Amino acid sequence: MFSRDTYISRRKTLKTLVHQGIIFFPGNGESGMNYRDNCYPFRQDSTFLYYTGINNIPDICFIIDIDNDVGILFGDDPTPEEMVWTGAVKPLAEFAEKSGIGQVKPLKELPEFLKTRKEKGQRIHYLPPYRGDTSIQVGELLGLPIDKVEENKSEVFIKAVVQQRSIKSTEEIAEIDNAVNITTQMHLHAIKNAVPGRSEKEIAGELQAIAIAGGGNISFPIILTRNGQYLHNHATQAIIQEGDIILCDCGAETSMNYAGDMTRTFPAGKSYSPLQKEVYNIVLNAHNTAVEALKPGVLFKDVHLLACTKIAQGLKELGLMKGDVNEAVANGAHTLFFQCGLGHFMGMDVHDMENLGENYVGYNDEVRKSDQFGLKSLRLGKALEQGNVLTVEPGIYFNPFLIDSWEAQKKHTEFVNYDEVKKFKNFGGIRVEEDFLITTSGSRLLGKPLDKTPEDIEKFKSL
């Protein structure tokens, strides 16, 4: 946990932003994998963590009664019989004290508390649930049909959380630096050990061990693949072959649940082929150009489009695209090769606060989310602010299914040289990703630098 004052201050600001009523934080519970007592690894809700710091305790809820200036933690201490399975567990009152929460009450008192407050006319604010069991819990506690839970979410609560969590404090940045440094160790291991003859899953398992040894776990399922043309192709039993280019996208999560998220694309053997290096450098140029453009006040959508233009220009020089590159990007022709967004916020979630809705987190009244293919996958479009933490991750992906589909439709033939593009159907994909903090006048790379030029990666592999 951070200091007691940190959580008290966060809640004080939240109360000011929401103004009145009851703020309801339902914590996550255990979730069975294949039967009730064999559970998935527990992960507390990030917003619950942000305002309380209380981690690794399932089935607790927190209430802020703004009107009466009261905070109450609802939950039950384990019985001696239950501690047969877990060992000694600290009482909830001890965690409440560390968080600056004034009261602790049994969980059985929560329904009556909420019912009474609702009857008095107090508004119950809650965030949109992302788990089915939480939706059921909220519906039962507040007397709402399950299909009405989503529509009764509190927009003022959502906007208040986004406003606070989007700007990272000094102590949060230190945690994220730590997460990125562990992530760097994962990548160094992958670059050295993802070699011909080994399976993707072997390497992915070793990377997860590094994350766990760092005190937490992975921040998302590891993407380590010889088929990087598929954006979220997680590790399989596929055996790595000489000549393969390996895309590794992975991240560590610290014990305080702050995330790292980085990608490197490297040869399975000692070096890239000349063509692999040429395509890699197009991606790297787009990445570096985007990073140079990061600063407060700049629309991240514009940074995304700048990177798209650099990719289109590089592909034109390679003979795969043609025509005016600005016009090609405006029409979405480049999305044959770059189908996703340039980046996203990162913090306690690897895609920070995405459960609250992209239209609240990454967009606003000034910048609306697009429905155009490719651009609709951009999770962040609004102006950057000092204190934001985000990823920058351009890529080029030669997806054979998309290539065949677009050619059959004769789509964007004025910008795409399909005869040349078809020669790349077995090429794969390349992505370069780093994490950045927006500063007063630009940005700062988070964590220790990790090799990203083809020459530096080849040199590291040869050591």
Image (tube, rainbow, N blue to C red):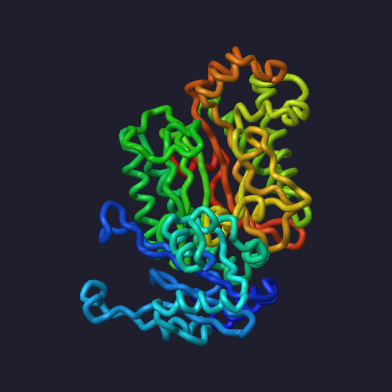
**Residue drawn 33% across the image and 48% down it:** 205
* Total marks placed: 0
Instruction: Please identify the quarter of the rendering in which residue 318 is found.
Output: top right
State the quadrant of the C terminus.
top left
- Does residue 324 lie above or below 353 as drawn? above
On the image, the x and y values in percent for residue 327 come to 77, 27
Location of residue 437 (image quadrant):
bottom right
- Can you give x and y, in whole percent of width and height, for residue 395 in the image? 59, 36
Vertical order, 65 against 411 (above or below): below
Q: Is residue 196 left or right of residue 354?
A: left
Relative depth, front residue between 235 and 103 = 103
Closer to the camera in the image, 151 or 280: 151
Location of residue 108 in the rendering, given as x and y in whole percent from the top left corner: 39, 77
In the image, residue 88 lies at what x, y percent? 28, 80
Question: What residue do we see at 51% from left, 37% from top?
Answer: 231
In the image: residue 330, left or right of residue 351: right
Front one among 318 and 215: 215
Q: Residue at x 62, y 50 (%)?
A: 358
Residue 172, picture quadrant = bottom right
Q: Is residue 73 visible?
A: yes
Q: Is residue 180 visible?
A: no
Q: Residue at x 69, y 56 (%)?
A: 443
184, 115: nearer the viewer: 115
